[in-house]
Image (cartoon, grey):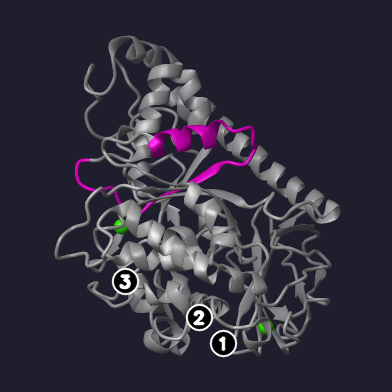
Amino acid sequence: MAAGNLSGKGKPIAKGEWMNHSIAKNLSDFVNRVALFRFLVLPLVFALCSLVGATETILNLSDSKAKSPPGKAKLRVFVETDAGGDPDDEQSMVRFLLYAKEWDIEGIICTLSVARKGENLNPERTGLGIVRRLIQAYGACFPNLLLHDPDYPKPEWLLERTVSGYEDSEEGVNRIVAAVDAPDPRPIWFMNWGTAGSASSSLKRALDRVLKERGPSGYAAFKKRICLSSSDQFGEHTTRILPPFPIWVDTFRPEMDKRRWYWRFSAITAKAGGFDIQRDMLTGHGPLGALYPTNTTHKQKEGDSMSFLYLVPTGMNDPRHPNWGSWAGRYGPNPAQKGLPYYWANQPDTWQGTTHRENSLIRFAVDLQNDFRARLEYCVKPFKGANHPPQVILNQIHGTEIVHLAVTPGQSQKMSAVGSKDPDGNALSYDWRVYAEAGSYPGKVTVQNANNPEAEITLPKDLGSDSIHILLTVKDSGIPSLTRYRRVVFTAK
Ligand SMILES: [Ca+2]
Ligand SMILES: [Ca+2]
């Protein structure tokens, strides 16, 4: 049986090792040849993903005009967590819940049926109990959170979607299948924060089920709707069974200088901007911040947080472009998965005199930690007592969409952030900067009036087929100072 081996590495999967014969035969017929897949099917998957992206943009525009209910164009997300093991999942869940308004949360799946003695001190002793306790604390903060943004989801809504993914439970599998099958054009972004013990990921089991029940073409149609910002807990589905996921961003790896990427998160962000865990979270900030456990290897470990920080729409990022940068850093193709749309955190940025992948996170560390600090204040303070981020308008375009401009090389181009405002009336500062690593143009480009609301750039005559990325950073004068961004991507007409 010639099952597809996407990675091109390792021995082919033996018949019966992972699926029954008839399915294997179907899959074999479907796959036929890896080369065919890479050159014909993979571009098709990309094209379909682009279509999904285009639909998102259209939804965004029509939403803003029609003033339909908020949330229509948000990313749809799943979290699968081994809360009950290393308490850092609970740390990440505190932060995740304070960002709950940024996405449509389709499910929170708990994989650990019994909390680990010694390692985990939570009085709740199941994964589900631990996450529910955090959501209840969120619920206690909810009326106050609404003062700051009416878009925060109801705690009941979150509780309904929080299910077990234990070894003997199909709840997580059922929820994933229902969400993927729903008549909604948006893909699912799936995050695995760990799968405990002998249980396997509910996404892995959902894919096993769909392959068995729907055959290879049904499986392919299902899988192309699932994007990963995640560790890999999906067995053969990640690299061996065709087609691949449309995109996999591994926010946990690779190791570099013996430091895994997720492990560096704490070192880089924990105290950024002067964040003080006791002052800014554990005391005086309501019941959710108070549940942030500190009995981890680092007081603020949050090994899983980058999986969702990658998906926070700050105006700078587009999750379909890992190389462009985000609050979880910048990602390039994973060389072990050659030819596949699979990425990891191996991209260096030059920043303040050094060149290292850590700079792709360091450059935004104060911004993302200040933002967390402000959201903790939303749990307890009135609107006027807290700071809220600027709303950046780029060339008269509201929202967070990336702006693409086709230009004539050699000409100068004006860019404007006029109209940008701050909900607290804070003064705003502007920084227009070439994000050289995100674009492909190798030469030097400078921005004129880089600290004004209106800036100008002269596009090089030899731009050719390259791109130039300009990142606009708008920072307010509140406490803590908050930041939002917009990005312009220039290409030649
Ligand atoms: Ca975990
Ligand atoms: Ca403000």
In this view of the protein, which residue sits in the foreground, 15 or 461? Answer: 15
Question: Could you tell me residue 257's position as x and y percent?
Answer: 25, 69
Q: Is residue 199 magenta?
A: no
Taking the image as drawn, is residue 152 in sight? yes
Residue 67 in the image: state x and y as whole percent.
82, 55
Q: Secondary structure at mark 1?
A: loop
Q: Which residues are magenta?
A: 171-198
Is 22 placed above or below 446 here?
Answer: above
Q: Callout 3: 10 Å neighbours few (<14), some, many (20+)?
A: many
Could you say where residue 243 lies in the image, as x and y percent from the top left?
Answer: 45, 29
Residue 250 versus residue 20: which sits nearer the camera?
20
Q: In percent of the image, x 26 and y 58: which residue is there?
A: 84
**Which residue has dot 2 on it?**
373
- Tell me the number on the disc at residue 29: none
The image quarter containing residue 244 is top left
Outermost residue, left side: 118
How many callouts does the rendering have?
A: 3
Instruction: Determine which residue is flagged by label 1.
Output: 480
Q: Are marks 2 and 1 in contact (CB under 8 Å)?
A: yes
Amino acid at the residue labelled 2: Arg
- At a point 22% along the width and 51% down the height, the residue shown is 114
Nearer to me, 407 or 298: 298
Which quadrant contains ligand 2? bottom right
Q: Secondary structure at mark 3?
A: loop
Identify the residue position indicated by label 3 in the image: 301
- Dot placed on the residue nearer the N-terminal end, 1 or 3: 3
Distance from label 2 to label 3 (Cα)?
Answer: 16 Å
Asked if residue 329 can be seen in this view, the reply is no
